[in-house]
Image: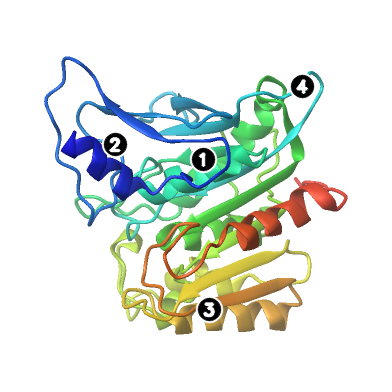
């Protein structure tokens, strides 16, 4: 029982949401598993998640090419009336481009809250830089492929293909921003799979992501240092691409973040302003690096879900561009 109680504390799923509870249960034939609060891993060993009332989850869905091992988890409203079309949001985990998981506490919290609000959430795993493997631009291709996959499966999932957003934290925030700001003209759309569908999103939420890698530090997934290849760092920085054709972006950052400096989000907001992109930067007093939609400092659900409502529900859909 201690394992289950720890799980509930770690996950921090939307327990306060009306009509919903989150329960972790252990498979009868599985040994107890230790959960790491430091990593935020929400599922380990024999533990599984019972979604709250109103949410249906599809685990480990194949969304990449057949030879890829990375998968996605889908968080869906439990009931959609016949003919109803829901907006969708891709959820991208953090971990410095070399770690993290689609089923970490933050991602479960975000996916569950989205589904309770009537969205289809798609939390993805993507190419990670392990053992020195260079993954640029593959991790970005994977994020864009997730958007295409949603459009390909729009009928089955009852998704409106013209109302797709993205949210990511830390390294995932960088990827989410890159999804929002780059298009075919930047040469960063993958050839396939599902190349007949657009990669474009209609809005993005960046949670404390590195935005200007030239002002950050050397990163392994690029395979070279800033001194060796400044053009690579510029190409993988969202600040490079902002222009007035880009969709709205919400940026959140905590003042107690010692992993990614608040300056990164300030540089990003300034680049968006210079490019004429609709945006908002919200600084969360006392928040550390890595928080979900319900940190102790502030309930961010009204802000984040309200942003998605405004840009994916309330206003006419911005057509996805090829």
Q: Can see residue 249?
A: yes
Of the two numbered discs 3 and 4 on the same chain, state the one appearing first in sequence: 4
Q: CA distance from mark 1 to mark 4?
A: 19 Å
Quote the CA–CA distance across marks 3 and 2.
30 Å
Q: Earlier in the sequence, mark 1 or mark 4?
A: 4
Q: Earlier in the sequence, mark 3 or mark 1?
A: 1
The residue at the far left in this view is: 31
Q: Are marks 3 and 1 in contact (CB under 8 Å)?
A: no
Q: Quadrant of the C terminus?
A: top right
> In the drawing, what numbered circle is on residue 43?
2
Q: CA distance from mark 1 to mark 2?
A: 15 Å
Residue marked by disc 4: 81
Return the residue at label 1.
Answer: 112
Looking at the image, tell me whether mark 1 or mark 2 is earlier in sequence order: 2
The answer to the question of whether label 4 and label 2 lie on touching residues, with beta carbons closer than 8 A, is no
Q: Position of residue 62 (x, y in %)?
A: 46, 26
Q: Which mark is residue 85?
A: none
């Amino acid at each position: 029982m201690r394992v289950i109680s720890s799980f509930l504390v770690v996950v921090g799923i939307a327990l306060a949401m009306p009509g919903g509870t989150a329960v972790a249960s252990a498979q009868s034939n599985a040994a107890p598993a230790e959960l790491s609060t430091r990593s935020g891993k929400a599922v380990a060993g024999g533990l599984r998640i019972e979604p709250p009332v109103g949410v249906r989850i599809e685990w480990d869905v194949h969304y990449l090419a057949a030879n890829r091992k990375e998968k996605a988890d889908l968080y869906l409203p439990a009931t959609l009336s016949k003919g109803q079309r829901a907006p969708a949001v891709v959820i991208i985990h953090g971990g410095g481009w070399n770690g993290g998981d689609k089923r970490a506490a933050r991602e479960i919290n975000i996916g569950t809250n989205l589904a309770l609000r009537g969205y289809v959430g798609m939390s993805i795993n993507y190419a990670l830089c392990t053992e020195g493997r260079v993954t640029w631009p593959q991790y970005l291709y994977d994020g864009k492929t997730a958007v295409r996959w949603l459009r390909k499966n729009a009928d089955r999932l009852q998704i409106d293909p013209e109302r797709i957003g993205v949210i990511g934290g830390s390294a995932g925030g960088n990827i989410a921003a890159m999804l929002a700001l780059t298009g075919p003209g930047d040469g960063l759309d993958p050839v396939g799979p599902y190349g007949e569908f657009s990669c474009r999103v209609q809005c993005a939420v960046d949670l404390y992501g590195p935005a200007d890698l030239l002002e950050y530090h050397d990163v392994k997934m690029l395979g070279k240092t800033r001194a060796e290849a400044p053009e690579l760092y510029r190409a993988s920085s969202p600040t490079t691409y902002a222009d007035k054709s880009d969709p709205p972006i919400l940026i959140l950052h905590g003042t107690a973040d010692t992993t990614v400096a608040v300056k990164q989000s300030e540089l990003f907001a300034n680049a968006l302003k210079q490019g004429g992109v609709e945006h908002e930067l919200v600084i969360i007093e006392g928040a550390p690096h890595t928080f979900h939609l319900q940190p102790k400092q502030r309930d961010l659900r009204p802000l984040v879900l309200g942003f998605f409502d405004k840009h994916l529900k309330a206003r006419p859909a911005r057509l996805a561009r090829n």
